[in-house]
Amino acid sequence: MNYDSDRRSSSPYGGERQGGRGGPRGRGMPLSELDPTLTGASHKLIGCARDVHMALGPGYDRQVYLEALKAEMAAQGIVFQAAHHFPVTYKGQPVGQAVPDLFVSERFLVNVLASPGEVGGFERAQLRAQLKAADLELGLIINFAGRLLKDGLVRVLNLDKIQAMKGDGEGDDHDPHSTPDEFGEGEHDARH
């Protein structure tokens, strides 16, 4: 099962807070269950996004934020590839490519948005598909359009990959559209 994050979080990256109003909703997986190297790299990236958002604020086109984020990541020494292509196969045959905005530290994917409102189901599904094609555990969606960056940070997990790494055969009976789980304030405190 692929699992993405919607509006839940209490601690820096997981836990139980629904839409900031308290109370659990659906199933969640705290980032503490992921490789600490992976979560550390994602924290660094979120720090870069926070710096970009603090400097530019909302209102620019998506490409402006993507270019600024790439510049900040380069300045921070974060290794990344922009628009990296991952093959998509169907029954063993290549049928296309998945192309996320950023492939970071060869560990996770990032897609950048600059759209008013909450990150929608399509954006989550798109990143879940990209994670599946890339065979990676974690992806981030960063929407720079809001007044507070934390409101536009969404994590998406590839639970199939995570369970396979743990040797856990569960997940075959889970709904891939189950309730997602959003980033709250991270160690870098994504709030402004």
Image: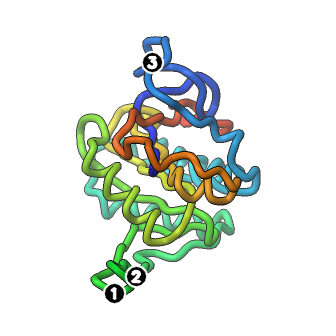
Q: In this view, does 87 lie above or below 72?
A: below
* Of pointers 3 and 1, the one earlier in the residue sequence: 3
List the residue tagged with mark 3: 20
Q: How many labels does the image show?
A: 3
Tell which of 85 and 129 is nearer to you.
129
Nearer to us of marks 3 and 2 is 2
Residue 55 seen from this side: no
* Residue for point 43% across, 71% down: 133
Image point 51% across, 49% down: which residue? 157
- Label 1 crowd bin: few (<14), some (14–19), many (20+), radius 10 Å: few
> Which residue is under mark 2?
87
Amino acid beneath label 3: Gly
User: What residue did someone put label 1 on?
Assistant: 94
In front of the other: 98 or 140: 98
Labels 2 & 1 near each other (Cβ < 8 A): yes
Q: Which residue is drawn at 59% across and 36% down?
A: 29
Question: Marks 3 and 1, Cα distance to the nearest angstrom?
Answer: 42 Å
Question: Which residue type does callout 2 highlight?
Answer: Pro
